[in-house]
């Protein structure tokens, strides 16, 4: 390691080597924390070689440019935007912009990062997808650094990595070491679920978290947009849904323009937006604006005035769903929509005499999961006609609903053994799956719970290699009961960063000590970029958070 | 209740009546939440009578004025400051300030709040103390509202209460109901401990939390200013302590001007600042700037290079403490200083041959708690010469150190039975005490943990009435291992508000349902005033937090 890099790492190490406790009851396991040889890289790239040779970066004149051979040029605003963003992350926005003489690179400096998109179709104007190529190669050496990627998605990941290699020396000068990186994600689906129904999240909060996602190479925003408590999605086809079902019809809704902006903001960062419209349960707020959609519950022989899940026995239900999902399929460009399907409570269905008759007609007996499957089957057929694939929560699979082969089954239930068995069952049936059970980050406890989060692995179950390949990744979920704009961001970061590394880096990257060191520096970087990511433990950041 | 008040409460109730769960593992106990007849008052005053008659407040022309008979006039900047602050809280800062014709109050409006300090000495320019009178009487009726208090401290509490009575009707107009309140605190010492050693807290964060404290009628900021990890207090006498012991000597220290400003900011809100300089343990950071202060630990017969608690056998130690506490006693005006005394680890003392000899000379045998008491006794004598009273953690009492009768013993250890026994023991020995054990708010868990916090009562132990009277109150503690500027404020609020009501309101105020309703509205008020107080549960605020 170069002397300056060593110094920078030692200075930062001061922050993480001290493990003093307040007069408090439990002690953490003591770990000895040493600076990582990988500095602050997070998530760790697949192949990294950092040499001891360091170069200076001339702040004012440093350029990020399209390589001559690149298939993406100045008209690719996705990249031009990213160049500006990463220049600002690396050098701050306060540099004197004044006239800088063009000059050859000095003997130990790097004056350019050249970004070279090698594929004829850069995908600059496309949306990212489950099959997007996010791989890249990064070479930092004189006279220039070169970032090669087949598509713009790999370039975005590589820009983040490049920015993580830059460090300040003792004089405040920006340095980077000679480095070779070859990188690609272990899993294609690396998501964060945010819940905008239990608490409304102002657009500003969603955007800030999309920024933080990009800094952690996440690529899916699972937008749990509506649920029982509120319906903030402003539908063009059924405006009464949010008019009646939102917390407030003007201040607590997402208009079509808001949604469009969020999708574009995400796209510019290589992030897919998958909306979840969960049915037939979790729909109380839907009923306020849509008459006859929900099942009237009975108390004895008379309606009680309360409502249960979506009413599965009316034709009007399916005609409503057809229109709504037709709108959704055009508003959200991603190839997938999440259809929910979890936690359907049968008690209301059971109480309703019309439902009872229907059950008899259909020969379902008393098995209400058959009624649920009946509903879901019809919904899946409707969504299939919109040309979308679908994700569903594991209950839909558990209940034996017939699914398209490309269905993504989302595992969220049970203890460790149970979710592993579930992953084994799903993949042995030949379906693709993704994991969330160990990553319910809304659940909190005292201490460094990121370590448990970090240790979980979505391929760690009994199954063949072919089964393991059916695991497309996972999602960190932050359900909304206890979070809103006041506390969401620090509760999510850097705990979700632990998930990010599990889903991006090689399976073998499991050293908790090394992770602690890199993650501590990574969280200070998030803070410096304006994300209020909470501390892992007693420590400090050179630049503390500026907010309250 | 008036129709408009009823409407306002019903609108807010929407937020708290819905208890839907995400697909998550545990269910909360379901409570039925109804709007409280006390609206959003928090902490609940001792005696409240709210009538159904409502009045309008003319936003632009409303005045908070000194009553003619008041002993505090325009020169009392503490009150003038508070008038401005509360006007802004009630009416926002965006009102058109333009010329407003002076006019008589309309038939159903209140145009003035008159603040009447009845005692000849208003204490406007004093510091609050353990014996400050915080009682007040508030009458809201035509033509004017009147707030009577013996001292400015009661006026501050009454202004907060008045501001909590104001609500918006359906047209956005400000209303207040005819009300009579007679109020005083149940306990004299109602504190919050913040720890600026494990993480440095920027001044801005400390000030915001002092604001929030005033909104909750807290009156003590227990500033755990230094500890093992860092020494951010810039001492005039020993500048090397922070020069060497702070995380950074310039960016992570509190200068004399900073400390002065924090004390004055607190005073203006009726909040005492009690600094804690914890010795002889928890002093690793002190050793960096003060040679020979800490005990050298031995490994066999040679010094190991590490250090233990303060070295209690050197005269230089006491001469250092004399100078340091002399400075502290003049920098911090409060009559008390917290001397710590918790968690002294004896292993280093045991390893050191000089300490062993001293133990033998003194006839302490192998009982190192005697050595600890020897040190503490000398320290207490030193602090006594500075004319300060002292607070200490319970261990000092447990170890049988001789204490001045006015010592405040701070209980923090054990389970519920143990802390109750400790309170009984301390008070049966005739000492004053305060409780923190159930209020270690750094400890977090999933769900509505404010309810457990709310249920704890510092007088709930076996003892005589005389013993109960020795309980001066309690403190919510937020130790710093896992909090810094990024997450401290939402982690503390509104959980600390539960402690605030326990310490201010009558013993009988224990209805969780009523508390939930008032606290939900109180937390939305904190949010509207710029404090990112986290949500209690699924809900919304009319004005969500504007930050990230």
Image (cartoon, coloured by chain):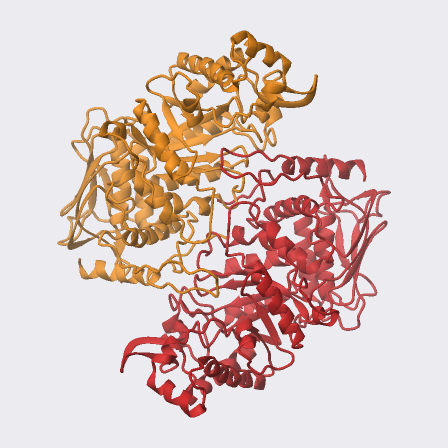
Chain colours: A orange, B red
Name the residue nearer the viewer: A353 or A43: A353
Q: Nearer the viewer, residue A97 or B198?
A: B198
Name the residue located 60 percent from the left edge and 35 percent from the top edge.
B19
Q: Is residue B446 above or below residue B304?
A: above
Q: Residue at x 20, y 44 (%)?
A: A112
Total numbered badges shown on the rendered structure: 0
Q: Looking at the picture, how far across and down is residue B182, in whole percent?
A: 80, 58
Name the image quarter holding the N terminus of chain A: bottom left
- Quick check: B478 above or below A392? below
Give x and y (percent) for residue B480.
46, 60
Q: Is residue B183 left or right of residue A414?
A: right
Q: Nearer the viewer, residue B41 or A444?
A: A444
Q: Is residue A496 visible?
A: yes
Q: Is residue A469 left or right of residue B425?
A: left
> Residue farthest to the top?
A361
Quadrant in which residue A465 is drawn: top left
- Residue A96 in sight in this render: no
Classify A218 as above or below B271: above
């Amino acid at each position: 390691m170069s002397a300056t890099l060593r110094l920078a790492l030692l200075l930062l190490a001061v922050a993480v080597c001290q493990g003093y406790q307040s007069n408090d009851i439990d002690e953490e396991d003591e770990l000895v924390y040493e600076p990582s040889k990988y500095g602050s890289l997070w998530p760790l790239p697949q192949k990294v070689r950092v040499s001891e040779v360091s170069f200076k970066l001339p702040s004012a004149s440093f350029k990020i440019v399209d390589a001559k051979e690149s298939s993406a040029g100045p008209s690719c605003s996705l990249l031009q935007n990213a160049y500006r963003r990463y220049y600002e992350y690396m050098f701050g926005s306060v540099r004197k912009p004044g006239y800088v003489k063009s000059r050859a690179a000095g003997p130990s400096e790097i004056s350019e990062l050249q970004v070279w998109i090698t594929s004829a179709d850069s995908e600059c104007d496309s949306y990212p997808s489950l099959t997007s190529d996010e791989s890249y190669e990064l070479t930092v050496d004189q006279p220039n650094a070169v970032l090669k990627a087949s598509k713009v998605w790999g370039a975005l990941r590589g820009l983040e990595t490049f920015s993580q290699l830059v460090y300040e020396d003792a004089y405040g000068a920006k340095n980077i070491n000679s480095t070779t990186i070859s990188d690609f994600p272990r899993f294609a689906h690396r998501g964060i679920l945010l819940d905008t129904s239990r608490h409304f999240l102002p657009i500003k909060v969603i955007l800030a978290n999309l920024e933080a996602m990009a800094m952690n190479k996440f690529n899916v925003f699972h937008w749990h947009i509506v649920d029982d408590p509120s319906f903030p999605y402003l539908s063009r086809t059924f405006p009464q849904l949010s008019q009646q079902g939102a917390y407030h019809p003007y201040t607590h809704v997402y208009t079509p323009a808001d949604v469009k902006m969020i999708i574009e903001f995400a796209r510019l960062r290589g992030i897919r937006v998958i909306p979840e419209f969960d049915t037939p349960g979790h729909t109380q707020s839907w009923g306020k604006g849509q008459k006859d959609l929900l099942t009237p519950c009975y108390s004895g022989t008379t309606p009680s005035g309360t409502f249960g899940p979506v009413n599965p026995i009316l034709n009007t239900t399916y005609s409503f769903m057809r229109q709504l999902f037709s709108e959704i399929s055009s508003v959200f460009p991603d190839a997938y929509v999440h259809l929910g399907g979890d936690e359907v409570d049968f008690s209301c269905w059971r109480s309703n005499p019309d439902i009872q008759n229907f059950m008899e007609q259909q020969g379902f007996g008393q098995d209400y999961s058959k009624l649920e499957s009946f509903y879901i089957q019809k919904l899946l057929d409707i969504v299939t006609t919109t040309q979308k694939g679908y994700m569903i929560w594991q209950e839909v699979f558990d209940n034996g609903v017939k699914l398209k082969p490309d269905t993504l089954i989302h595992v969220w239930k049970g203890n460790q053994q149970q979710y592993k068995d579930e992953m084994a069952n799903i993949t042995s049936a030949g379906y693709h799956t993704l994991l969330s059970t160990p990553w319910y980050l809304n659940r909190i406890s005292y201490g460094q719970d990121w370590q448990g989060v970090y240790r979980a692995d979505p391929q760690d179950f009994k199954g063949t290699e072919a089964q393991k390949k059916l695991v497309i990744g996972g999602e960190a979920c932050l359900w909304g009961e206890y979070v809103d704009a006041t506390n969401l961001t620090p509760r999510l970061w850097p705990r979700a960063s632990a998930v990010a590394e599990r889903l991006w880096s090689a399976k073998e990257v499991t050293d908790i000590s090394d992770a602690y060191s890199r993650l501590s520096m990574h969280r200070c970087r998030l803070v410096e970029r304006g994300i209020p990511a909470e501390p892992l433990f007693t420590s400090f950041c050179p630049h503390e958070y500026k907010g309250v």
